[in-house]
Amino acid sequence: LPCLDMVEKGQCFPLYLYDGEQDTGTEKPRMDSLFGENAPVASGRKKRHALTDEGLEHFRKAYPGAEISKEDVFYYVYGLLHAPWYREQYADNLAKELPRIPCVPGVKAFKTYCQAGRDLAGLHLNYESIEPYPLTITVHGDPKLTDADCRVEKMRYGKNGKDKDLSRIQYNDRITVSGIPLEAYD
């Protein structure tokens, strides 16, 4: 859960909104995931898409003939807001106001951002279930570690001659992590 300071100053663009009074019974609403898939809604609440019909129509006019759903627009926005070029180009605006969501040229680009948003949301939501890289952790000296041995002063990459060895990270003077595949940096 985010801290209250983040809630107070942050922005949220949800997929769904829940209207109505919450049932005063003992049943509490449960969210199985951030986006509410398979999550039962407490009685007395109505679930609706956060995107209005007018918002959906805006994107359908921009891409005539394309099948576009409210969910597609949500993931398009999710993908677009995480695009490095978008964050760089609109950095000044993003610091002061709500983000403006442009229509990228062409339905193919729209679908690409939509799929990227879906993939990214999957990674953000399911990161704990992804198979970790098979890393090797080497402890130098006494193999029994104390809390002080796990303290990080400054992590640095390993060395391969004069070059950095991106497959190794020197965690501290006692611990080295190796076997990091280069695609992990992507």
Image (cartoon, rainbow, N blue to C red):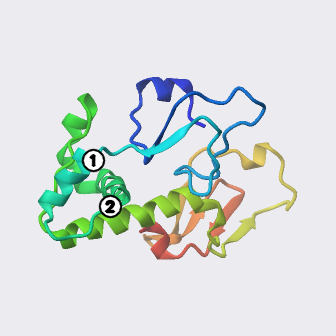
Q: Please say if the residues under marks 1 and 2 sit with CB atoms less than 8 Å apart.
A: no
Asked whether, in this view, residue 152 is left or right of residue 6, the answer is right
Query: As shown in the figure, which amino acid type bears the numbered disc 1?
Result: Asp
Q: Can you say whether 1 is above or below 109 in the image?
A: above
In the rendered structure, the answer to whether residue 174 lies left or right of residue 44 reads right
Q: Dot 2: what SS? A: loop
Q: Quadrant of the C terminus?
A: bottom left
Which element carries disc 1, helix, strand or loop?
Answer: helix
Say whether residue 129 is left or right of residue 71.
right
Taking the spot 77% from the left edge, 43% from the top edge, the residue there is 148
In the rendered view of the protein, which quadrant contains the N terminus? top right
* Residue count near mark 1 (Cα–Cα under 10 Å), binned few <14, some 14–19, many ≥20: few
Counting from the top left corner in percent of width and height, residue 40 is at 64, 49
**Residue drawn at x 87%, y 57% as measured from the top left:** 144
Q: Where is residue 120, by image quadrant?
A: bottom left
- Above or below residue 156? Residue 96 is above
Residue in the picture at 39% in, 34% down:
11
Dividing the picture into quadrants, the one containing residue 84 is: bottom left
Task: Work out whether residue 137 or residue 105 is closer to the camera in this orientation and state it.
Answer: 105
Report whether 45 appears left or right of 76: right
C-alpha span from label 1 to label 2: 10 Å
Mark 2 crowd level (few <14, some 14–19, many ≥20, 10 Å Cα)? few
Q: Amino acid at mark 2?
A: Ser
**Residue on which the image places disc 1:** 53
Foreground pick, 25 / 110: 25
Percent x, y of residue 95? 27, 32
How far from the left and from the top, in percent, is residue 146?
84, 47
Q: Earlier in the sequence, mark 1 or mark 2?
A: 1
At 43% from the left and 48% from the top, the residue drawn is 15
- The residue tagged 2 is 69
Q: Which mark is residue 153?
A: none
